[in-house]
């Protein structure tokens, strides 16, 4: 967590001499925003190639409260 508490940073170092010539360094940063989280439909494997949408993914008419 940063000093201003608005950024989270994860740092990873992978050392595997059999795979890499030198250590691999990776960084991922997340920034806090003051917007509300939006609810979205997120069903696993929601591509319906074979049933032509005969059984659609259910969706709520209003977000959870």
Image: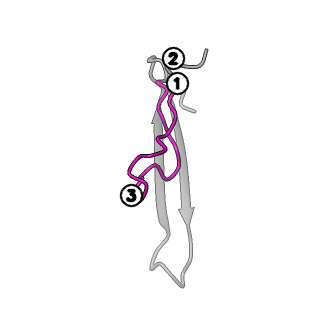
- SS of the residue under disc 2: loop
Q: Nearer the viewer, mark 2 or mark 3?
A: 3
Q: Quadrant of the C terminus?
A: top right
**Display colour scheme:** one colour
Mark 1 touches mark 3? (CB < 8 Å)? no
Extreme residue in the right direction: 65
Left or right of 15? Residue 49 is left
**Front-most of 65 and 1?**
65
Q: Which residue is mark 3?
A: 49
Q: Which residue is mark 2?
A: 62
Residue, x 55% and y 46% (percent of image)? 10
**Front-most of 52 and 36?**
52
Q: Is residue 14 above or below residue 52?
A: below
- Tell me which segment is drawn in magenta: 38-60
Q: Is residue 20 above or below residue 56?
A: below
Mark 2 touches mark 1? (CB < 8 Å)? yes
Q: Is residue 41 above or below residue 50?
A: above
Extreme residue in the top direction: 65
Dominant SS in magenta: loop
Mark 2 neighbour density, 10 Å: few (under 14) some (14–19) many (20 or more): few
- Reply yes or no: does residue 48 show up in magenta: yes
Residue, x 48% and y 35% (percent of image)? 41
Q: Which residue is mark 1?
A: 60
């Amino acid at each position: 967590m940063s000093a201003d508490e608005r950024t989270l940073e994860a740092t990873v170092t992978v050392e595997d001499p059999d795979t890499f010539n030198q250590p691999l360094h990776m960084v991922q940063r997340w920034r806090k925003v003051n917007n509300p989280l939006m609810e979205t439909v997120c069903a696993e494997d929601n591509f319906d190639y074979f049933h032509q949408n005969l059984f659609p993914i259910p969706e709520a008419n209003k977000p959870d409260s």
